[in-house]
Image: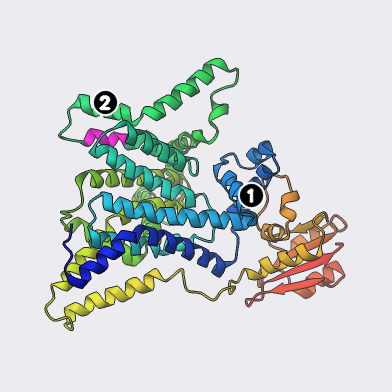
């Protein structure tokens, strides 16, 4: 630990005494600030709030039919009911709480692996202003709950590795089970993370085995319960596990891709793009495509600047980074990479939010890098030298990088016209009216979404010339059509096809519109 020196030491001590609490408050406020800036709901969020609405109405079966992993919708329903904020407000409030919890756990994790006063302060600034987390703040997604509980489980597992006890064995299990109730990937960590215990060189095999079973104690108890249910029920075990089968299905898809899909893609590449001199490289190129996608998405999520700083890690001797923390974080990183490639390889597709858990795992090393660079800057005798200016530029880039998701004009989103149209419909058209919209967000903001019982709804559908020709009039009392500039017929063409003027028109600066018609 560092020894305080003069005024600087007092400032650090004062900040450290409240740094986690301050980070929680800052993260909570910034999360709500981003919601205010964006003012737009995501499609997944609509699904969760529809399920939450059914839970509030007591229709648990309907909610399960709509979405089977019910913890997140249940929490949205609970917060909405207690706070009186409504479903959308309750969901954003819940996510803001998760954002604060994430900051608290991240800082605690850095402290647990050997962080000094300066390192902990760097960790607080890093996580509070991490662009990717702030960018996702306005989205109602399960990752908001998964990420803090995932890191919390790693924190307790590191403590278990340092001093094995039943307390930490239970706490790491409960934390990861909570994470798994948000995202099914947590089940993979429950199964695989304890294998890191066999990497302890100074432990005997019997000790490794004993603590491995202790780390799996809660899981073994749950498994035993499932087996009892299987033995005493006429229904199959699969009917009780639901999405717990997803990891096995993903492995099956990966195996089919390796045994069948890989050869097919290689043949397509060899015949359509490569020539006779390069066709032998087709399989290698197909194998490299997921690697390129993965690296590109990882750099995007961590941000290029922070990714470059991570390159310092292999060349630094982290004297304060405890070995127990390093081995757990690295093993968790390996498991994350395996999960991502299991999903990525068959589909050649990866969403940014899937990579956030890996990014947060790697970012635990970053506060140590920042302190390392800060201390090197302090050692420069001439603070106005060219060498010192490199650090000043780095500081400037860090500030710009951190504010990326936090600076915008409130309400300036190009999607705001969709929300405005939905709110107008809510005020002017009865919720009992039979209304059609080609954009689910309009139905959400109008309140008509909750009258629909279908498990699956098309999120967006473009109005095209063929769509207009095939439209059958008289089926709906009202229409709310989102018309995109350059991809849909003009307003005049739509008016000519319907034979009437719209009741209301909403438009953004790109000339995209929502046209509200009556009786078509």
Q: How many marks?
A: 2
Q: Where is residue 429? Give x, y as percent.
A: 81, 62
Q: How far from the left and from the top, in percent, is residue 422? A: 72, 64
Dominant secondary-structure state across the stretch colored magenta? helix
Report if residue 498 is visible in the image: yes
Percent of width and height locating residue 290: 40, 51
Q: Tell me: residue 374, above or below residue 204.
A: below
**Residue 414: x %, y % from top left:** 60, 72
Q: Residues within 10 Å of mark 2 (few under 14, many from 20)?
A: few
Q: Is residue 238 left or right of residue 386?
A: right
* Element marked by disc 2: helix
**Closer to us: 389 or 155:** 155
Residue 267 at least partly seen: no
Is mark 2 in CB contact (under 8 Å) with mark 1?
Answer: no
Figure quadrant of the C terminus = bottom right
Q: Nearer the viewer, residue 271 or 473?
A: 473
Q: CA distance from mark 2 to mark 1?
A: 45 Å
Colouring style: rainbow
Residue at screen point 67% across, 44% down:
56
Q: Residue at x 83, y 68 (%)?
A: 497
For the residue pair 353 and 482, the one nearer the viewer reads as 353
First in sequence: mark 2 vs mark 1: 1
262 vs 328, left or right, is right
Circle 1 residue? 81
Among the 4 quarters of the image, the one containing residue 366 = bottom left
Nearer to us of marks 2 and 1 is 1
Looking at the rendering, in which quadrant would you find the N terminus? bottom left
Disc 2 marks which residue?
A: 210
Q: Is residue 139 above or below residue 406?
A: above
Residue at the extreme left: 381
Judged from the image, the secondary structure of the residue bearing numbered disc 1 is helix
Q: Which residues are magenta?
A: 194-199
């Amino acid at each position: 630990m560092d020894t305080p020196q003069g005024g600087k030491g007092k400032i650090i001590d004062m900040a450290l005494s409240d740094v986690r609490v301050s980070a929680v408050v800052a993260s909570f406020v910034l999360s709500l600030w981003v919601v205010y800036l964006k003012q737009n709901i995501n499609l997944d969020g609509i699904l969760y709030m529809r399920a939450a609405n059914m839970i509030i109405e007591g229709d648990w079966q309907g909610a399960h039919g709509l979405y089977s992993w019910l913890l997140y919708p249940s929490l949205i329903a609970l917060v909405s009911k207690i706070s009186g904020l409504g479903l959308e407000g309750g969901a954003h409030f819940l996510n803001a709480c998760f954002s604060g919890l994430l900051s608290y756990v991240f800082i605690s994790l850095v402290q647990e692996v050997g962080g000094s006063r300066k390192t902990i302060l760097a960790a607080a600034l890093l996580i509070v202003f991490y662009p990717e987390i702030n960018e996702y703040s306005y989205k109602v997604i399960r990752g908001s709950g998964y990420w803090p509980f995932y890191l919390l489980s790693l924190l307790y597992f590191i403590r278990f590795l340092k001093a094995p006890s039943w307390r930490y064995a239970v706490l790491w299990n409960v934390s990861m089970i909570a994470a798994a109730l948000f995202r099914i990937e947590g089940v993979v960590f429950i199964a695989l993370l304890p294998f890191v215990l066999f990497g302890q060189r100074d432990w005997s095999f019997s000790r490794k085995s004993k603590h491995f079973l202790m780390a799996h104690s809660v899981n073994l108890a749950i498994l035993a319960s499932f087996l009892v249910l299987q033995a005493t029920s006429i229904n199959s075990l699969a009917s009780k596990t639901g999405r717990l089968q997803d990891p096995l299905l993903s492995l099956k898809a990966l195996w089919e891709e390796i045994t069948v899909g890989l050869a097919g893609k290689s043949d397509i590449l060899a015949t359509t793009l490569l020539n006779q001199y390069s066709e032998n490289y087709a399989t290698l190129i197909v194998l490299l495509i997921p690697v390129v996608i993965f690296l590109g998405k990882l750099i995007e999520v961590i941000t290029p600047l922070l990714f470059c700083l991570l390159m310092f890690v292999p060349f630094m001797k982290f004297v304060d980074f405890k070995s127990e923390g390093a081995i757990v974080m690295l093993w968790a990183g390996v498991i994350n990479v395996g999960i991502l490639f299991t999903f990525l390889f068959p589909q050649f597709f990866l969403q940014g939010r899937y990579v956030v858990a890996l990014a947060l795992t790697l970012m635990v090393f970053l506060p140590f890098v920042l302190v390392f660079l800060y201390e090197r800057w302090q050692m420069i005798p001439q603070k106005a030298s060219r060498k010192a200016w490199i650090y000043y530029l780095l500081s400037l880039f860090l500030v710009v990088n951190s504010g990326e998701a936090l600076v915008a004009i409130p309400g300036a989103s190009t999607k705001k016209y969709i929300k405005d149209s939905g709110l107008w419909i809510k005020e002017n058209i009865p919720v009992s009216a039979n209304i059609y919209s080609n954009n689910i967000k309009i139905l959400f903001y109008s309140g008509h979404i909750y009258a629909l019982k279908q498990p699956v709804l098309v999120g967006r559908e473009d109005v095209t010339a063929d769509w207009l020709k095939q439209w059958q009039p008289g089926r709906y009392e009202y229409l709310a059509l989102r018309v995109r500039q350059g991809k849909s017929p003009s307003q005049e063409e739509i008016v000519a096809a319907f034979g009437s003027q719209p009741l209301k028109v909403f438009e953004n600066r790109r000339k995209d519109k929502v046209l509200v018609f009556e009786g078509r």
